[in-house]
């Protein structure tokens, strides 16, 4: 599955935990790009009206997301939305970006058909409040798609060996909170993971809806 990403030379470093360049580095890049493949597997088959990415970073994923929505929006805590907007404009991708934390999104209720967060909530101090914000800005019939990393000593060692980064330093204990909080605040419709059959996946992606939405599931993936 080929995913459209920003060219490496177009990436802007927007913060200490913006590791978009990893997507282009050998085995690390292959594994990192699986996150975006998981999202695409859960996106609606039809093109939606408005899509929000929370934690968009350098905007690396917008070239793919623009294929799936008429209008793109993004929220991140860094202060370079204008710079990222300019980079995307050069390749014909219009976006509306804001500086805001996941816990306080500056958008009206029920605005978005799809909300995406890729490797974001492990960095969010207020996990529950952030997840409630995703639900608040989601339109009736909309979908939230969240990708979160797995947690195990082996995975944390691999992260250290391949990148020099410390999972415990970067994530604290938030990884173990994300899935239980998501599924307590919203209803899980589908879940996919990489590797697909692993008991402790490197990444897991969840597709969720508001609890008051009708249940239209035809089965869930693993």
Image (tube, helix red, strand yellow):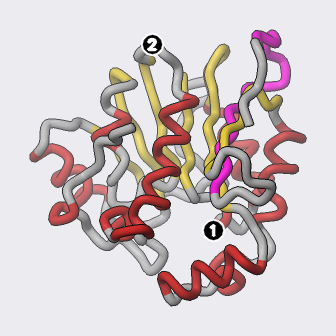
Q: Is residue 214 magenta?
A: yes
| Mark identifier at residue 50 | none
Q: Position of residue 4 (x, y in %)?
A: 29, 42
Left or right: where 210 falls relative to 115: right
Q: Where does the C terminus fall, quadrant-wise?
A: top right
Q: Identify residue for label 1.
A: 123
Q: Circle 2 — which element?
A: loop
Q: Which residues are magenta?
A: 203-216
Q: Nearer the viewer, mark 2 or mark 1?
A: 2
Q: Residue at x 24, y 50 (%)?
A: 85
Q: CA distance from mark 2 to mark 1?
A: 31 Å
Along the line of sight, the residue nearer the viewer: 144 or 5:
5
Residue 46 image label: 2
> Which is nearer the N-term, disc 2 or disc 1?
2
Q: Quadrant of residue 185?
A: top right
| 10 Å crowding of disc 2: few (<14), some (14-19), many (20+) | few
Relative placement, left or right, of 27 versus 219 is left
Q: Residue at x 82, y 12 (%)?
A: 215
Work out whether residue 99 can be spotted: no
């Amino acid at each position: 599955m080929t995913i459209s990403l920003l060219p490496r030379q177009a990436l802007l470093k927007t913060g200490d935990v913006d590791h978009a360049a990893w997507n282009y580095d050998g085995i690390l890049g292959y594994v990192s790009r699986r996150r975006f493949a998981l999202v695409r597997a859960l996106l609606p088959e039809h093109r939606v009206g408005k899509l929000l990415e929370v934690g968009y970073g350098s905007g690396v994923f917008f070239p793919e997301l623009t294929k799936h929505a008429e209008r793109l929006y993004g929220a991140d805590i860094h202060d370079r939305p204008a710079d990222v907007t300019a980079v995307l404009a050069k390749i014909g991708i219009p976006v509306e970006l804001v500086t805001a934390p996941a816990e306080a999104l500056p958008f009206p209720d029920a605005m978005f058909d799809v909300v995406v967060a890729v490797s974001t909530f492990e960095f969010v101090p207020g996990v529950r409040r952030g997840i409630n914000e995703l639900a608040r800005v989601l339109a009736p019939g909309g979908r939230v798609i969240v990708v979160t990393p797995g947690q195990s000593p082996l995975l944390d060692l691999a992260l250290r060996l391949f990148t020099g980064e410390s999972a415990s330093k970067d994530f604290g204990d938030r990884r173990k909170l994300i899935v239980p909080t998501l599924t307590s605040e919203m209803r899980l419709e589908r879940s996919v993971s990489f590797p697909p059959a692993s008991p402790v996946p490197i990444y897991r992606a969840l597709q969720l809806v508001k609890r008051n939405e009708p249940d239209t599931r035809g089965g869930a993936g693993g």
